[in-house]
Image: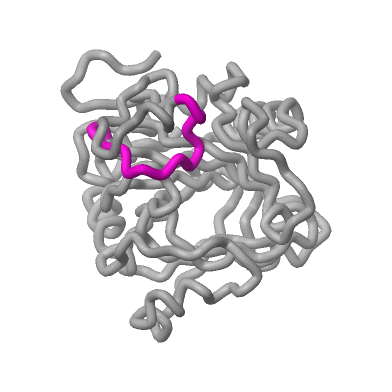
Amino acid sequence: MHTELTSQQIDSYRENGFVVIENFLTPDELATWRTYVDEAVQQREDRKLADGTMRAGDSYYDKVFVQRINLWQDHDGMRQLMFDARIGKMAAELAGVEGIRIWHDQALIKQPWANPTGWHLDNPYWSFSSRDAISLWVALDDATYENGCLYFVPGTHKTATFDNVGIGQNMGDLFTVYHQWADMPSVAAPMKAGSCSFHNGLLAHGAGANMTPGWRRAMTCAYMPDGSTFNGQKNVLPEDMAARLQVGDVLDDDAQNPLIYHRTKTHVTA
């Protein structure tokens, strides 16, 4: 695994809000990631969450991608992959934070002829608000212009508020909220299988439609800086946890949001 970051990569991430890392996984590691993701997704069937509280249907959104969340919770292989402290260290170095917790992982698989992913921000969906939230996106198949690679609008993380839109049928709804971004150029991020990107949780991004009969598999993980607090949104938190949390409470339950890396703390989730 290619986990060493250069100062240029860190600077580019902080300036643009994203960075692409070629050949992140070795061929053997890529094979393992593909195997575990395929197994975990198949095991879930139509359940987006392990507890079955969210299920896939036939909506426009469910035709954007096959989405299965927190696979680490019910697949030992995925737990091993997602708890890799080396990846947590990369996320912490890019974001400039002391420690990193998993917010949630998610497989995002564009099936043949899948809908495009509308422009959106990530962090406003989540149960914490942080300008340092960061996501990993690993290409398990070649992500191309034809099958739905990512697109970013560089620098938008600097001026984003926590306003957002849902991923719906109108690709550009986000720009009705952020009018100042409408004339900014986007950057495509095609990737070979085994490459990855990291992007800031407030960076405008989307993905094209899958215009092919093949599959475009990606495994992603959203990361929360250690010390983040509850903002009142349930998102993927269990009902009982969300009910007992008060706005401002620290989200530090390792059973829900494992601490996978910290620069100084000795207790890190194993």
Question: In which quadrant will I find the C terminus?
Answer: top left
Where is residue 164? Give x, y as percent: 43, 63
Asked whether residue 199 is drawn in magenta, I would say: no
Q: Nearer the viewer, residue 76 or 233?
A: 233
Q: Nearer the viewer, residue 106 or 21?
A: 106
Q: How many marks?
A: 0
Q: Nearer the viewer, residue 35 or 158?
A: 158
Residue for point 35% across, 25% down:
260
Using residue 256 as the reference point, say whether residue 210 is left or right of it.
right
Residue for point 38% across, 61% down:
203
Residue for point 54% across, 61% down:
166
Using residue 248 as the reference point, say whether residue 168 is left or right of it.
right
Using residue 59 as the reference point, say whether residue 97 is left or right of it.
left
The answer to whether 82 is drawn above or below residue 218 in the figure is above
Asked whether residue 237 is drawn in magenta, I would say: yes
Where is residue 4? Give x, y as percent: 32, 38
The answer to whether 175 is drawn above or below residue 35 in the figure is below
The answer to whether 226 is drawn above or below residue 218 in the figure is above
Q: Which residues are the magenta region? A: 226-240
Given the current orientation, which residue lies at the most extreme bottom position?
183
Q: Nearer the viewer, residue 110 or 86?
A: 110
Question: In which quadrant will I find the N terminus?
Answer: top left
The answer to whether 249 is drawn above or below residue 17 in the figure is above
Q: Splitting the image into 4 quarters, where does residue 50 fall?
A: top right
Where is residue 247? Give x, y as percent: 28, 39
Where is residue 140? Give x, y as percent: 62, 43
Give the prevailing secondary structure in the magenta stretch: loop
